[in-house]
Every structure is written in C-alpha cells, then in structure tokens.
Amino acid sequence: MSPSPDLSRVLPRVLIVSRRTVRKNKFVDFVGEYHLDLIVGYGAVPVIVPRVDGVHTMLDSFEPIHGVLLCEGEDIDPSLYDAGADNEKDGLTPDQLEAVRWLHPSDAAVDHEKDSIELLLARRCLERGIPFLGICRGSQVLNVACGGSLYQDVDQELPSHASNTAVCHMDYADYDGHRHPVRVLPGTPLQEWFAESLGGEEGDEMMVNSYHHQGVRRLAERFVPMAFAPDGLVEGFYDPDAYSPGEGKFIMGLQFHPERMRKAGSDEFDYPGCAKAYQEFVRAVVAYQAKLALSHDMEKQRNVLVRSFSRAEFLETAAAALSSQQEKRLKQMGATVRNASGYLNSRLKVNEDREAAARALMGKMSAVQLSSLAAFYRNMGAICSDVLDAKLQPTSPTLQE
C-alpha cells in the first residue's frame, strides 16, 4: 500500500503575516484562528510569516507563493502614503494625533517591519498576478501599495468632507457585536456573494462589523469600489481586471471582517455569503497553483525539445562537416574508384551511426515531445519543399525557351 501524499507539498500555500503583541513582557506573534480555519477548510495551507526583524529581506525563502492573505494590525506609517498630500488641509494636527494615540493605543503605534513585509508581499502579488485578499489593515496595505492614500483617523477627518450620516467604525464597548450598514454596489463580487441577504429600500444594504479607525481616503486608480458606509467610506474594493477565481485571478480588499461576522454565542455566520470571500480566494489560489505547475511543466518540455533539436542539429552539422572533409580529401588525393567506394561506405556508416544516435535519443522522449519534434520536422520539410520549388522554377522567358 503506497504511503499517503504529503499534503503540505501538494496543497497550495497561502502566506499570512502575523501580528505581535506583548505577553508576560515578551512579544508574541499570532494570527486569528478564524482566518486559518477558513483557509484550511477550503483546501489551502496557511504559511505564517512571523513579524520578526529582518524577515522582509527573506521573502524569497517563502516561495512558492500561491496566495497572500493580509489581515489586522497596527496603523500603516503615514509617510508611506504621503498623508496630507491630497490637500494642504488634509492630515492631522499634533493635538489630533495625540488624541488618536490616546483613543487607540493598540493600533496607533507604527510597526515598520510589518509595513515592509506586507507591502513587499502585496507588490509581489500585483507584479506576478498572485491571488491577494486584504482584510481590514490588509485592504489598506493593498490600496497604499497601488498608490492610494488613507485617512489617518476616520472620526477626525471624514466628517469634515462628508455630509452623510456619521458612522461608528470602532466600538470598544461592543467589540464583536457592533454592526453598521453598508451599501453594496451592483455587478460586484460582493453583491454576488450576498445577493440573497441584501435588504433595505434599494435592496442593496447589509450590516457589517467594524474594528478600525483608519480607512481609504483616495482609492488607487486600478480599483473599483464594492461597498460604501453611509458616511462615504469605502468598505470594499477589487480589481475587475484581476478577478476571475477559476482562472487564478483575485485582487481584493475588504475593510470589514466577514470571518468574524458571527451570531452571538455561536459560530454561525450572520449571512451565508460571509465565507464566500475566503472560498473564492482559495479557489483562485488553487487555480493559480495549477497554472503555475502547468507553466513549469511546459517550460521543462520546451527545454527538453530545445536540447533535442540542438542534438539533432549537432548530428546534422557533424555529418555535413565530415562529408565535406572527405570530399575535399578525395579531390586532393586524386581518389580512385576504389577510394570512392570506400568513401561511400564511410558515408553509409555515418548515416547508420546518426540513425542509431537519433533512435536512442528519441527513445528517452515522451509521446508529447516526440509529437512536437515530428511536427517541427514536418514544418521544416514543408518549408524546404517550398523554397526548393521556388529555386527550380524558371525565372525568365529565355530560360523557358
């Protein structure tokens, strides 16, 4: 009975960067269990990237990367998105910054190493088309990586720009139970996932949780919004040109936490669509891994064929060179008929050696490789025939006579 496969080698790998906290005067790295449960449940392997100094220089060691999930964490360094550059009045005053630090002490600190790790991973995903899901801070990282900007504090900055109803985006007194409405835009993945649960007068509203004091100010150009809070804050966005889970494409950011939208005292989701973000993300990750494997196999086959063609071309060249040397030598020595006979025999021997070498080489090739090689030589034969016909055809009336 054959041993069971090593699933850690077979299943696709999703990188998740940990968050650190202080416990017993020491830093402890952690990732929320709901994220891990959903990734594993839908068929991928979560690979935790520890938030340790210097890890941002070691990301190549985490390859292969089939997907990246970025989730909660501290505020992103404002210098990374040039806070206040959109308008000279934007940005927070020193007094406002101090108030934010007092209200949100666990979030307002900046973790430069985490910023470096996550921005590098986000940009790697964007460059290679690796599936990416950003939750809460992760969505903000994605927007910043693409040139967008953030509100340093929604309560301090957003009301001055919006005339809509103010929204509570962080309620420490009811951390897990707090919800606020969002308007879901039609024709978006979010609308598709929650279609059966949307309500309100327009049939486009649902209630989401909220654990953040920052948010998207200027959405990067490549993204399309999927949902808005009543105060105008973007609650979800995606890249429509990079969204096709079945083809391994998925680039999305959600400001809320669908994995934590659960009924009180239960693991049951608020809506059936809550797990869809993870389900479709992992579907894209699986497809991306398959696409990567296919590309790798095709490259290996191409290299084998190139080596095969090179070997065949070498044999042809060697034989041609040998024949040329023999012919030259025969002419120089005034070869007799007997010598000519020996020459012909040597040519036959060369042809036999070439055939034997070719058969030995082709015996090691797969059916697909042999088929590709045969097609190559058929094409070469057709080209030679066309060129030869063109050379043998008369080119002038004088030749025709």
Image (spheres, grey):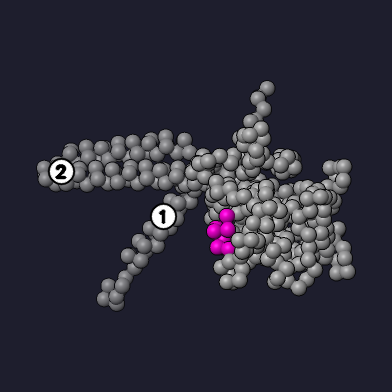
In this view, 19 is above or below 212: above
The quadrant holding residue 222 is bottom right
Where in the figure is residue 228, as x and y percent of width and height? 75, 65
x 17%, y 41%: residue: 337
Q: Nearer the viewer, residue 81 or 107?
A: 107
Q: Nearer the viewer, residue 366 or 291?
A: 291
In this view, 240 is above or below 115: below
Q: Secondary structure at mark 1?
A: helix
Determine which residue is flagged by label 1: 380
From which residue to which does the magenta span run?
Answer: 77-83
Where in the figure is residue 346, as x and y percent of width and height? 25, 37
| Mark identifier at residue 329 | 2
Q: From this viewpoint, is residue 234 visible?
A: no
Q: Quadrant of the N terminus?
A: top right
The quadrant holding residue 43 is top right
The quadrant holding residue 87 is bottom right
Where in the figure is residue 308, as x and y percent of width and height? 41, 43
Question: In the figure, is residue 389 to the left or right of 242?
Answer: left
Q: Nearer the viewer, mark 1 or mark 2?
A: 1
Q: Secondary structure at mark 2?
A: helix
